[in-house]
Amino acid sequence: MAELGFEVVGVDTDPKKIEQLAAGVLPFHEPGLPELLRKHTTSGRLRFTTSYAEIGPWADIHFIAVGTPQKAGDHAADMTYVDMAVETLASHISRDCVIVGKSTVPVGSARRLSDLIRNTVAGDNTVSLLWNPEFLREGFAVQDTLQPDRLVVGGDDAQAIDLLKEVYGLPLASGTPFISTDLETAELVKAAANAFLATKISFINAFSEVTEHVGGDIRVLADAIGLDNRIGRRFLNAGVGFGGGCLPKDIRALQARVSELGLDRTMRFLTEVDEINLRRRDRVVHLAKEILHDLQGRKIAVLGVAFKPNSDDVRDSPALDVAAQLYNAGADVSVFDPEAMNNARLRFPRLTYSTSAAEALKDSTLTILLTEWEEFRTLDPSAVGETVESKSIIDGRNVLDPIRWQTEGWRFESLGRKS
Ligand SMILES: NC(=O)c1ccc[n+]([C@@H]2O[C@H](COP(=O)([O-])OP(=O)(O)OC[C@H]3O[C@@H](n4cnc5c(N)ncnc54)[C@H](O)[C@@H]3O)[C@@H](O)[C@H]2O)c1
């Protein structure tokens, strides 16, 4: 937002994060963002605070982007943080302004929050709520914010929508489509987009189970159906499946919300989508057992713990889950990830955290690639073969060339092909 030309104050309840950000230090990995953070903390256009009292009377427009994690012991979204942020903000507002929700929320939340705002804001200040779901991809957050592929806004206050259009003036001028709709549709667009993407991944992974069984090549199948432009090749990469802080919790929350509305069967297919996804993790562990017979005390190198490359996010990471399962089965698991080591260590401290891929691979009896960082995609099977104890590899992301590895004497397994 500062790069788009605005004066911005970032608010978080976590004082440590605010302290880091104010010092120009990004508390997570996101390509291109450290440079923008430094540029605008220096230019003075971007400040940080933990104080709602500071921003309530100040801003023309407030974006709410706090977390909506899965509730403990339940599939529904935990709305505590959004409710708290909106209520605290509303109680500090002393002027006309617009609140724009960006968090991914269950359908119906925005209308409920509009009532909360109306009942909380003091005096006769006019405060409108719009919902503007966020579609950015971790790893491409800067690009997706400055040049989004679409902007969706729910709400019916034309003046507030015009103000939001001003905020997005630059991307709109360069042709980004702007879809204006009601609050419910805006909330559902985000849920539908994530449900579709998750389904596409689990669809190809379900076919993986079949090709593994009958003998076939899932990559060829994906290429062949992907050439049909009604289907498209993207998100048809068979592998260890999806994870992260969005898709898993969002498909569960959607299902929970739709059931709550009485439409019990409507989103039931998402249970299958979730289960197919989790079964892929088990498949990797199964393959490891097939290769090593007994995992007890065997040294396994796991390449990647982030849920995807170019991110240090390990929330619901398939890679970290598989590494933990192997550890729990008795293996001595050495992991390496270019960016996600600290986050992984916090979640699962008992793995061996190596300082490089080479260190993780040294003397290993099995190598498993689980996050497709460029550094792992370009590994040289000949050089790697010199350092391992046994030349066996599982490509959990189908990104390595099996022929190249087999020619160098490796036992090569991947997902979606008969082993
Ligand atoms: N991460 C993504 O790629 C992505 C993409 C699209 C949409 N979303 C959605 O955006 C939302 C945020 O996701 P995230 O990954 O950034 O979550 P996160 O958990 O990483 O960050 C949420 C932040 O909100 C802060 N917070 C909590 N309560 C607060 C309050 N009352 N006031 C101020 N700050 C508060 C937390 O301290 C934390 O720093 C979620 O709804 C998510 O589904 C995320």
Image: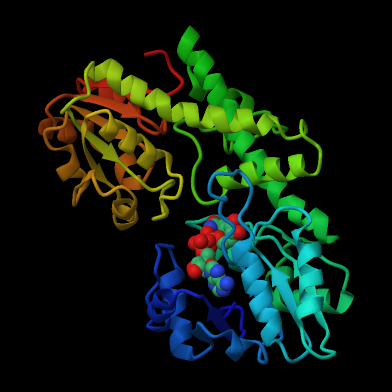
User: Ligand 1, what quadrant?
Assistant: bottom right
Examine the image and state in which quarter residue 41 appears: bottom left
**Residue 335 rendering spot, x and y as whole percentages:** 25, 43
Q: How many circles with numbers are drawn on the protein? A: 0
The colour scheme is rainbow
Which residue is at 71% across, 72% downward? Answer: 100
Is residue 85 visible from the viewing direction of this image? Answer: yes
**The C terminus appears in which quarter of the rendering?**
top left
Which residue is at 36% across, 46% downward? Answer: 373
Is residue 146 shown left or right of residue 302?
right
Which residue is at 39% across, 48% downward? Answer: 306
Between 100 and 89, the residue placed more toward the observer is 89
Is residue 91 shown left or right of residue 243?
right
Between 307 and 271, the residue placed more toward the observer is 271
Residue 138 against residue 125 in the figure, above or below: above
**Residue 38 rendering spot, x and y as whole percentages:** 41, 80
Furthest residue in direction front, as rendered: 73
Residue 350 against residue 67 in the figure, above or below: above
**Residue 260 rendering spot, x and y as whole percentages:** 76, 43
Which residue is at 28% across, 33% downward? Answer: 328
Is residue 226 visible from the viewing direction of this image? Answer: no
Examine the image and state in which quarter residue 164 appears: bottom right
